Image (tube, rainbow, N blue to C red):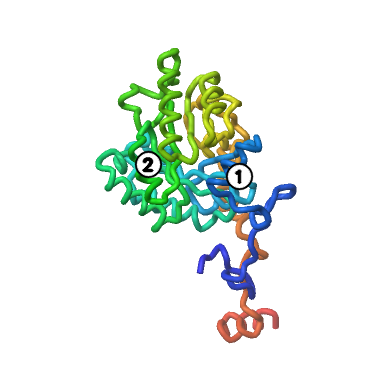
Amino acid sequence: MSLTNLSDGLPADNRPAAAPAAGLPSASTLSKVTMPALAQMKRQARPITALTAYDYATSRLVDEAGIDLILVGDSLAMVVLGQDNTLAITVDEMLHHTRAVRRAVRRALLVADMPFGSYHAAIPEAVANAVRFVKEAGAEAVKIEGPRTELVAALAAAEIPVVGHLGLTPQSLLRMGGYRVQAKTADAAAQLCAEAHALAQAGAGALVLEGVPREVAARITAELTIPVIGIGAGPECDGQILVLHDMLNLTFAPHAKFVRQYADASALIREAVDRYREDVEQRAFPTDAESYHLPAAETGAAFPAATSGAAAARG
């Protein structure tokens, strides 16, 4: 039993579920988001909200806030594990974090990134890796980068929903020579549009467009029947996604142009840790009220010498 859950007379496994913040919808009262539900949202012109999450606590908060899609992104290599890029993350590490998120998510569609190297060789091997994300980690869809139409078709045939990812694809970092905006010429824009259509025709259920001009993303969004979710792709996309740590200022790096900071969790955590350190150093924590006590009768039985000595001193 975790010490965090200790209380007088309340076992840890009987704790009530945390309530969502005031004004936010409860995940239990909202319909489960599925891939067909995302397609319906596009048809109804209802914006799709998406965020990354990598652990139980943050994914629970994101889900309870009513976010439609949660991506266990390979960005965890950088923002959680401290890697320089996304290339080093392994299938087992991604599975580990996806399982943690799965335990928290009730409403959102749970999508897992397939990491670099897990789908770049033979298609049967890639499908087998994708099956692991569904069977072992509870993912409801996988995301792959690049115009891999044959793989998308194979995954769709295996009943595994697929989210495509075009434009700035971080796993192509070495080929691109850095994180650069893509489709900046007419020819490149036409090529990106063709790739987007090909992925949709192959069976992708949704598409992420990253780091592309607004005009290009708007055209692709208008032409495709599947939802298009943008990150650095302008406001005309069917939905938007951000890395949670970016929007909370927890990445310790300069933000991309498209990142809007919604809170400064870094400052909040620093302040809390500083206050805790000061309280411990000044012996202000814990107080008597934050301590457990023996009943008076048990104290006398446990420490008779101390009790009799105190009584003699009073006499």
> Which of 306 and 54 lies nearest the eye of the viewer?
54
The residue most toward the front is 201
Q: Residue at the location (64% across, 47% down)?
A: 65
Q: Quadrant of residue 295?
A: bottom right
Image height of 57 relative to 310, above or below: above
Q: Nearer the viewer, residue 82 or 258?
A: 258
- Residue 104 position in % (x across, y down): 54, 56
What numbered label is drawn on residue 153? 2
Q: Amino acid at mark 2?
A: Ala
Name the residue beneath numbered marker 1. Answer: 67
Crowd tier of the residue under label 1, counting other residues whose Cα lies within 10 Å: few below 14, some 14–19, many 20 or above: many
Identify the residue shown where x is 60% and y is 36%: 264
* 248 on left or right of 118: right
The answer to whether any part of residue 213 appears in the image is yes
Asked whether the beta carbons under mark 2 and mark 1 sit within 8 Å of each other, the answer is: no
| Front in this rendered view, residue 101 or 141 | 141
Q: Secondary structure at mark 1?
A: loop
Q: Is residue 267 above or below residue 125?
A: above
Residue 250 lies, in percent from the top left, at 52, 37
Q: Quadrant of the C terminus?
A: bottom right
Please report the residue visible at 48 percent of the width from the left and 22 percent of the height from the top.
212
Extreme residue toward the right, this view: 23
Amino acid type, callout 1: Ile
Q: Residue lying farthest left? A: 122
Q: Earlier in the sequence, mark 2 or mark 1?
A: 1
Q: On the picture, is 75 further left or further right than 281?
A: left
The reply to whether residue 84 is in sight is no
Work out how far the residue at label 2 is from the one at label 1, CA to CA, in angstroms.
28 Å
Tag in front: 2 or 1: 2
Residue 284: x and y, percent? 62, 55
Residue under the image location 58 percent in, 34 percent down:
239
